[in-house]
Image (cartoon, rainbow, N blue to C red):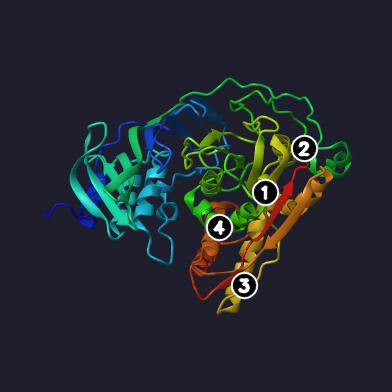
Amino acid sequence: MAYPQPARTPLLALAARLRTSACDTATGRYDLVHYRQWNKPARHGAAVREVVRWRGDDRSGGQLATQHPTGVVPVTHDWWRPGDLYNVGPITPFTRTDMLRVDLGINKPSPADPTEVLANLAYLATWYSPRRDGRAAAFTVLAGLSPLTYYPGVVDRSGRPGIAVAATSGGRRALLVLRPDTGEVLAYESARLGPIGWRAQTYLLYLAHSHATRRWWQPAARPRSATPSPPLVPAAATALAADNAHALSHHDDPRSHSMTATAPTQRYQFRNSPHQLHPLQEMLDPVTLDDLTRLGVNPGHTALDVGAGAGSIAQHLCELVGRSGKVIAVDIDTSMLNPTEVLDVYQRDLRTQPLPVEPGTIDIATARCVLEHLPNRHLLLHQMINALRPGGHLVLGEIVYAPVSAHAPVDSDNELITRVVHTILDVLAGRGVDLHWGDKVPSVLLANGFEQVHTHWVAETWAGGSAGCRLYADNVTQLRDRLLAEDLSHDELDRFAELMADPAVLVRGYQFASTTARKPH
């Protein structure tokens, strides 16, 4: 048979072998993953990160991470109590084909990009140790993807022999290396085509995938401080007291850089996955980039991106500040952020940990779709304000409540779309998300003496299959259990997903409020 060859037949054969194999010997409810990651950005050299991570089905987890260069924090110990780890779901997607297809990016009306699918599978492998049935399900899904190429004999960077599945699209190549007997992921490489051939940009080497009956480690519980934090400004304290009382009841030690063992119950309501972040970027980046262009970010500036997600705004800020500047990106899940000479990446749970910046050191600070989800939103905004230099700018964006309307060929579908989207908003509000926060931001900034406060609201119709409707569909997937508890049925949610992929459907999208303001000199 030709070498290489189409991947469909070998993948189906591997899946069939795994379903009857006894290749899994480790047991336990906790997934253990150990991987090493090399990144080589086009301009800023290489970065290396090594992570040992465990996660439980109760959304608890921990990790030890080391990274180089040391322009970022070189060693971090992170711990998530049960319920806190929201960037991965409580149920592994490898147990449900529908969830797996969503997480791999195959649930789209247009053909899936095979390089994106392999990248998504590599990302899942940094969090999960799927059992043989789950691996078999993944390979069966991949077998239906075209075009994929199979290589029967390859070696990863550690010298381990394996088989490989590769895809090429738009000058990008993705390569996934697998153990031929167990189907476990050994390595992943993403490369770009340049003037002298393919050049690797990211390489992931999976050193261990296993399971355990006990947590790998956890810190001793530590009581939280009961010291009250100061109000934003004395004049605004009374007006904000009702909305801010629970947020200002505890004080974060600004010297602490480790995650506390106790965290508030309220958290960001969606997983930090590509299927959530990429549609948001596609829809909202043009708005944020226009704001940054209008404000004028210059070479040599220092920028702060709070809740950096997949890093599109952080990357744009890096381009604006240049090699003489600095960008600080902060998120609870930094797995999609690659540190460089310009970009420093900090993993922080901002409900319990302070921003990793000194007062008066930031020229521009951004936060998008973050503060409304956090119970301490006023305290976090206070930290951002303190971090700004006199004359520095804020760019704050949030989804805000607005009525929903839909236009589908069948009236009953219009009613269903409206009911599902309104229920999504009701569920979020019931979980502590302030869907009016974006409307309140201008008043809060004016009360703190900010100048040139400007807010503009953006809302438009989304057609089925667009980024916005993909976001709606992903929201339903992630909130499915809660939506079912609100008297929506499985059939109704499945129908909603179909409508979000139908180009004949138009629906009013989420309304986005973007506010810019300048700190007085």
Tag nearer the camera, 4 or 3:
3
Residue in front for this viewpoint, 174 or 469: 174
* Label placed on residue 406: 3
Residue type at mark 4? Val
**Can residue 331 be seen?**
no
Residue 487 drawn above or below residue 65? below
- Circle 3 packing at 10 Å, graded few (<14), some (14-19), many (20+), is some
Q: Earlier in the sequence, mark 3 or mark 1?
A: 1
Residue type at mark 2? His
Residue 88 drawn above or below residue 459? above
Q: Which residue is mark 4?
A: 476
Q: Which residue is mark 2?
A: 246
Tag nearer the camera, 2 or 4:
2
Label 2 and label 4: CA atoms lie apart by 29 Å
Classify residue 377 as left or right of residue 39: right
Q: Earlier in the sequence, mark 2 or mark 3?
A: 2
Residue in front for this viewpoint, 64 or 303: 303
Label 4 and label 3: CA atoms lie apart by 16 Å
Label 3 and label 1: CA atoms lie apart by 31 Å
- Circle 4 packing at 10 Å, graded few (<14), some (14-19), many (20+), is many
Label 1 and label 2: CA atoms lie apart by 25 Å
Classify residue 246 as left or right of residue 478: right
- Circle 1 packing at 10 Å, graded few (<14), some (14-19), many (20+), is many
* Label placed on residue 379: none
| Residues tagged 3 and 1 counted as in contact (Cβ below 8 A) | no
